[in-house]
Amino acid sequence: MATDDKYDRQLRLWGASGQRALGNTLVVLVGTSACGTETLKNLVLPGVGSILVVDDDDDVDGAVTTRARTELTDSLSKFASPASNFFLPPPPSSSSSRCVRNDDGDGDDGNSPRPASNAARVCALLTELNPDVVGHHLAAPSLEDLDYDSFLATLANDQPPPPPPSSSSSSSSSSSSFSSTTMTPRTVLVVSADQPSTVFLPLSRACHRRSTPLIVVRSYGLLGYVRVQTPMPYHPVIEARPSHRLPDLRLSSWPIFDGLADVLSSSTDLDDVTDTRDRSHAPFVVVLLQALDKWRRRRGGGRGVGECDDDDDDDAAAPPANVGRRQRHPETGAEKEEFRSIVRDMARDLNHEMNFKEALQEAHLIWADGRISEDVRAVLDRVDEGSFLRAAVKSDMDVDGGVEGGGGEAGEGRPSYGGFEIPPRVLQFQLLVLALKRFLKANDDYPPLEGTIPDMTSDTARYVALQEAYRRQAERDRSAIREIAKSLLDECERQSSGCDLRIAMPTDDEVQTFCKNSRYLRILETRPLFAEYELQDPASPVVASLASTLPSTSASHNIDAIQSDARDDLLATTMDPHETDPVQTPMLWWIALRACDAFYDRHQHYPGKHDQELALEADANEVYWCMVQIAGSMGLTESDFIKEHLLDRVRGKDLAREVVRYDEAEIHNIAAVVGGVASQEAVKLITGQYVPVDDTYVYNGIASTAGVYRF
Amino acid sequence: MTASASQGASSISSSSIKRDASEMNNMVTMTTRLDANATVRGRRRPPLSRRQRGNLSTLLSRRSPFSNETGSLAIGEFEPSAAPSVDGVARSSLRDARILVVGAGGLGCEILKDLAMCDGIFVDIVVMDLDTIDVTNLNRQFLFRSKDVGDSKAAVAAKFINQRCPWMNVVPYHGKIQDKDASFYRQFKVVISGLDNVEARSITSENPIPTLLLPNRWLNGMINNLVEFDDDGDPLPETIIPLIDGGTEGFSGQSRLILPRITSCFECSLDAFAPSAAVPLCTIAETPRIPEHCIAYAYVLQWPREFPDRKLDADSSGDMKWVYERALERAEKFGIGGVTYMLTLGVVKNIIPAVASTNAIVSAVCVNEAMKALSFCSQSLNTYMMYMGSEGIYSHTFVYEQKQNCPVCTTTTHHMSVSSIMTLNSLLQQLCDGEFRLKAPSVTSSMKTLYMRKPVALEKVTRVNLDKPLKDLMTSGEELVVTDPVFPDTSLRLVVKFTDVDE
Ligand SMILES: [Zn+2]
């Protein structure tokens, strides 16, 4: 074996920092169905720090038990009968099986042996996959009665245990865990698997208030979905890792940075070079810059419109304070063509001068704008110094306000949605973004240089010199960012009047990663799951309080705006039916699934329980009625697509019949697709790399179509 | 914690163990608090986890408005079985269906598990893989443990599944797919292929560009070739074996359903797997610029010079360290940064990043299609689904059209116009480099064998033809028959016309 690192194949995707983030995360699974265990399997294998499996259980009489580990016994790892969940052996038949242990392993047969709970059995089979992962399990009498707020509060601490119950004392201890920056706070991510709304809605509220990412997974017959709820205030992405990166060469900026100017001035004019090898091994960057110079001279001195400046070389060293001084580069189609023909004329033999060929292909880099994009501008606009300073030095006072006391009412009607604590990861992101903003102001909106160049035809010396010029400039930009961040922290320090800060200076590696990726910064903010349900019910008091916290593009924060915004999103997606078979458009099936949930709320069981044709048809009628209601409350009844395929009674009823046929079946293949997608999203949320889905992925296993919707 | 935590040691594991103690304390505290809550509330109904849900048998026993024959790619007509069985008793026709799983790696492990979890309706599986288990497999190939490193993938995977799922009968075959002939492949009702898309190990100093996709193409050719036709030239349905193919790379992957001679086949989409442009040897030898060039220099040029009698073993850490150190020396000499051991491994072995999650998605989509193609209980994928997970999720299902003139799934004769003085060797080269992307073609004309690679004796006799101009070997417009290892038991019919000869 050439390496003994079992994580080698994934480190190539998310690197050592991503792996550290995984190792520092606790994943909580609520529900032990197949799509939940499949999600966890794909997180245990790559080495998540620990897992906590939670489920409700008949055998727990009012007592909640947690155990770190259940021994893996033969009876656990050998399934007695066919199943649909690879990590949950079918419950042993009552007579033979009551000797399965659920204790920590000491004392082989206690006096009252109980069968291991679902959570215990799942935990044992999952942790067996990877000895690096610590497993816990918890059996509760009812998932619908759990107080998820205090549950999450306890999990967030990576400190010695907080003093027990009384709400005031525990709140101060939980926030004190951030007071020391030497302690890395543990990240928590929650997965809700195959739960009805009576569980996932309270869980969604608690996660929202606790700023904890939540992934809701569901497999239902041949259908399934994965829904992401980002933590408050948003999920920052520094390493978006786009599949295509435009080289950051800064050829169109004026003046070009010193190092590049030096490379250019030390290169002989290629027209004067006679040695063919010499000519054909000049990097295309030099070719393009010399061509640009020609183009500017041809354009009459190459000065910007109405501007005149005599001494380019001196100018290059000066800070680019005056935008008006920027020299022009080809902009119109005709100018670009003119530029290309200059390059073509410079070449003597395009078939043998690969560098000139490359210059032609890469000519667009001359007019590529290296300044910050609109997308990144939107990210910058979300961060301001005032609120950052307040959050960074915020005392423990109102941090947990309105959360610990939340209890079972789950905050209905209380304007407490803003009462979350900004997570340290977000604070650090904000610090660097603020540093970037100041940097941009001083640098004509050019972000820190990336510092790497693509491979290009060249001899070694000239390529290495060019690479070195970019690397040095990138290093200079990076230390500028670092200095700005430091001074921002100093300001925090001054305002904190002695209190500890909730943020420390990022490491050099972190600053470097940020600078290298500053052209691709992203913020993801999903609409919380509970908000979807409540937005559809205008009578809900929560809508009012949400209106004050949800992002709004317009200045007016009103309910109508939020509702119509949500509806417009959905309406737009109905314009995009599946091309070969519109009825397999996942949106239709999502509505059918919502109808099954509504059916459950009315009957406490899912449709299709009974095999008789008449019973199935009756359920289908009711599910169809629910579908029509839901389509209405989603504001979709005006959509031609919905009219044709759902409101049309004959077609719509077929959708209902199909979901009724399922009897909420757990089909392993669907659960595995859903678990695979969910774990991929989990990795993105945990590592802060790549871009998570916004916000729901619906898989239709009937014809294997899928869609992404924002609900 | 048990002692097992010391295996596969990494810095991550030790930190998580340290945390364990305090975590446990927290749990206990939480327990008491939740406890108090629960007793206050009391219980209303049985736990949600114990609710009865339907399963695959439910689907198989109930009619559907969306059964297979209603879909845009219909394979068969759905007949709901009688009552759903509670205890996994045989549903005769499906239980007899033997399934072939090709590959027991990242996709194969998932595929086997998915088949085993089909509620006991699939039992007879054959799994083929020629590989042994490596430690870098363990982050996703979840049927293997560190104690299994070095053992046969097929054997360990089959044993694991048979053990956990005693109703399963998975038979392993440790070897190449090319070892088996048509009579072997004919016994299966469906073939699921989860092969790595690149023959990583075929990279040598003579052949620095990996030979792409040979096993996939061979298998596709074999399954397409099993189709027989009736007198009207229509394919006989009972000879069509659905081939379901999956592949992944990082966060992206694809699944597709191939109905031989009816839908597009693997060969039809060969262009989608464009081979990456090779770095010219002169760059590697004379003008290195990036770390990859230095690594290539070390293993393509330096290794054979230093060890003329021994092939580089990319799995040996000794060999790889040697390559890494030579690459580093060269990089330092030229002032090039960035040569690391990890990059060296990646370049030499042409490593494709792989994670559990993507394998899970692609495999489950494949097995779901297998389930439907055998039971007809729902519609079939028509024909190609791609999944890209790195920037949000982009997932697209579409009909991959059959390629006109596909040498495998159509019966077209191909035409080529060349100069009559072109040598046979150049013609063969063109077949390798051009659209057909052959690997080692042999050619016969209607009159005689022009060039045959095997057996050795025949190769010797025909080798003299390689340097002859075509006009000495054939006439213009003559039909040649080309065989190649990428097309098992089948051949390419090629009409070659001379551009410089009047007919
Ligand atoms: Zn084909």
Image (cartoon, coloured by chain):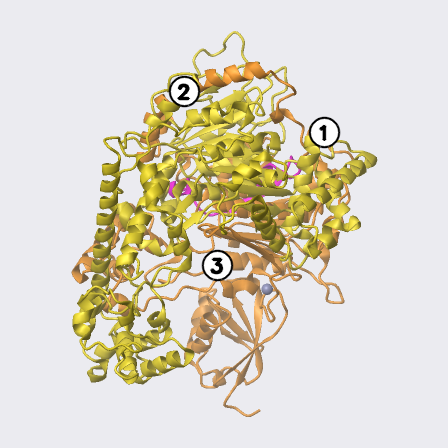
Write down which quadrant ligand 1 falls in.
Answer: bottom right
Instruction: Give residue A603's mark.
Output: 1
Seen as rendered, the residue at the extreme top is A111
| Left or right, residue B86 beside residue A290 | right
Chain letter for the yellow colouring in the rendering: A
Q: Would you call the spot at circle 2 few (<14 residues within 10 Å), some (14-19), or many (20 or more)?
A: few
State the residue position of label 2.
A168
Which chain wears orange?
B
What is the CA distance from the residue labelled 3 to the residue labelled 2? 64 Å
Q: Secondary structure at mark 2?
A: helix
User: Circle 3 is placed at which residue position?
Assistant: B213
Q: Say yes or no: labels 1 and 3 on the same chain.
A: no
Whichever of callouts 1 and 2 sits on the residue coming sooner in the sequence is 2
Which of discs 1 and 3 lies nearer the camera? The answer is 1
* Residue A648, horizontal then vertical, whole percent: 77, 51
Left or right of A195, for residue B303 = left
Label 1 beta carbon less than 8 Å to ligand 1: no
